[in-house]
Amino acid sequence: MSRTATFTAVLIIVAGLAYGLGRKHGAARRDVALPLAVDPLTSAASLPRPVAKPPNVASPAHEAAAFKPATALDRSLPFVQDMLSAQTGYEAAALNLDHALKQMETVATSDRKGFITGVFSFIARHRTPAEALALCGQQATKVRSDALRTLASEWISARSPLDEEKRSALRERIQAPSRGRLGLEVELAFAIASSQPDDELVNAWLNAFSAHPGRSEMLPALANKLLRDNPDDLLNRTAGWTEWERGRAARTVLEDWASRAPQEAWTWYQAQQARLGQDLAPSILEPWARSDPEMAKTVLNSLSDPGQRQAAVEAIGRALALRNTVEAVQWADGLPNADEKEAAHSSIYGATPRGIGAAIGMENGFPTLRSILPGSPLEGTGVRPGDRFVEVRQADGTRQSLYGAPLESAVRLIRGEPESELELRLLRRNEGTGQLEEVRVPVRRAQLYFGEPSSKKQ
């Protein structure tokens, strides 16, 4: 072997050893210095700008789009949790996207989340939303959730017109563990909807999940703007859905529409009722009566369908009851139809609460009195705002602790039918000593009334 060949062989061996040692130490240390772009104002690291033009880009416009690193990365994002793996994933996608997608499932478990984040960060920035969601849908389940979170985070960052503080809050919400109630796709849809998304992103998401079990939740959340511009699109998008899904989506859309423009919503509904295939009049009449009960009365006079008339009567009764209970009862008494009169009285009674007349909020785990309804049973008992409800004792002697209970549960235990009795156990801070003292107050529940002088409330 010549001296030149021998020298070359030695160099190769040394280089190999150095590379191996470098990988060993690099794997052991996650705080290795990286060639990252740093914003001088925030010192927030971002992914590096690729030197070569990324291959496999769908259109010339995307090919021409240079990667622009974020100037202030959210510290809750996977980028920052595992920057090295995210950088590796991003660079792998920039060099060969198809290979990087295949590599995601084989990368070490400790690096997988960051690697997936890097790959789909590249996809979000270099592909259309429709293309990105299609690629996401092709991935295994263990990859898809991290991929979806990354896409949503990137789109909110790059496409939302909200200010940086609000976008950061939404991205933090996206990265939080799923609560599981509605499913990740629906939770992300709500977050995207809050970001004021553009039509391209909305359509891409709805089309990608057009067969998802939560589509009746996603459509109203995301497509409000689109449906306002073209209400018939509601019928087109829900064609082929089950009757339950179609009704659920339509009710949500109509309620929102009626809260803003009830006459428009009503006119459209009357024309399309046959195509909707179910009675959704209450979805419009309820918010209409709350915002303008006098106009709702006019609508009632124009209705001939018995079902719609009853829905209008009940909606008006509930709305009037919360404004002025006596006037609501007088209106119900004036209805000429006996069945409608009974329905009106029933709705007024149901809408008017029975209880002690306390407005309650939560404070440090205690249901806490905020205010007392004038003329209610609690008035004159000595109870005052700031008192904390500790326990309630029912007439049969049953005791129920209120500390730590959800507000809805506490309210349910305090409320009850008129003339029933209870004893409240309260904590109150002594204004002189600053010490907490216990107070017990017996109360008799009553029907509560609104919009009247105190003298009328007995």
Image: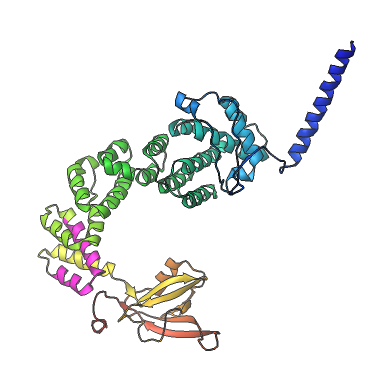
Q: Residue at x 22, y 72 (%)?
A: 324
Q: Considering only vertical position in the picture, is 264 above or below 95?
A: below
Q: Residue at x 31, y 38 (%)?
A: 238
77 left or right of 208? Answer: right
Q: Main secondary structure of the magenta part?
A: helix
Q: Residue at x 44, y 81 (%)?
A: 424
224 left or right of 3? Answer: left
The x, y position of residue 267, in whole percent, is 18, 47
Q: Considering only vertical position in the picture, is 364 above or below 458?
A: above
- Does the magenta portion include 320? yes
- Does the magenta portion include 116? no
The x, y position of residue 80, in whole percent, is 62, 45
The x, y position of residue 62, in whole percent, is 47, 28
Tell me the magenta residue range: 309-333
Quarter of the figure that contains the N terminus:
top right
Asked whether 282 or 190 is in front, the reply is: 190
288 left or right of 430? Answer: left
Q: Is residue 59 visible?
A: no
Q: Residue at x 27, y 39 (%)?
A: 235
Q: Which residue in the rendered view is the most extreme toward the front?
A: 40
In which quarter of the view is residue 369 placed? bottom left
Asked whether 440 or 374 is in front, the reply is: 374
Quarter of the figure that contains the C terminus:
bottom left
The x, y position of residue 85, in whole percent, is 65, 37
Q: Which residue in the rendered view is the most extreme toward the left?
A: 336
Q: Which residue in the rendered view is the most extreme toward the bottom?
A: 432
183 left or right of 225? Answer: right
Asked whether 105 or 170 is in front, the reply is: 170
| Number of callouts | 0
Q: Is residue 250 visible?
A: yes
Q: Considering only vertical position in the picture, is 166 above or below 25?
A: below
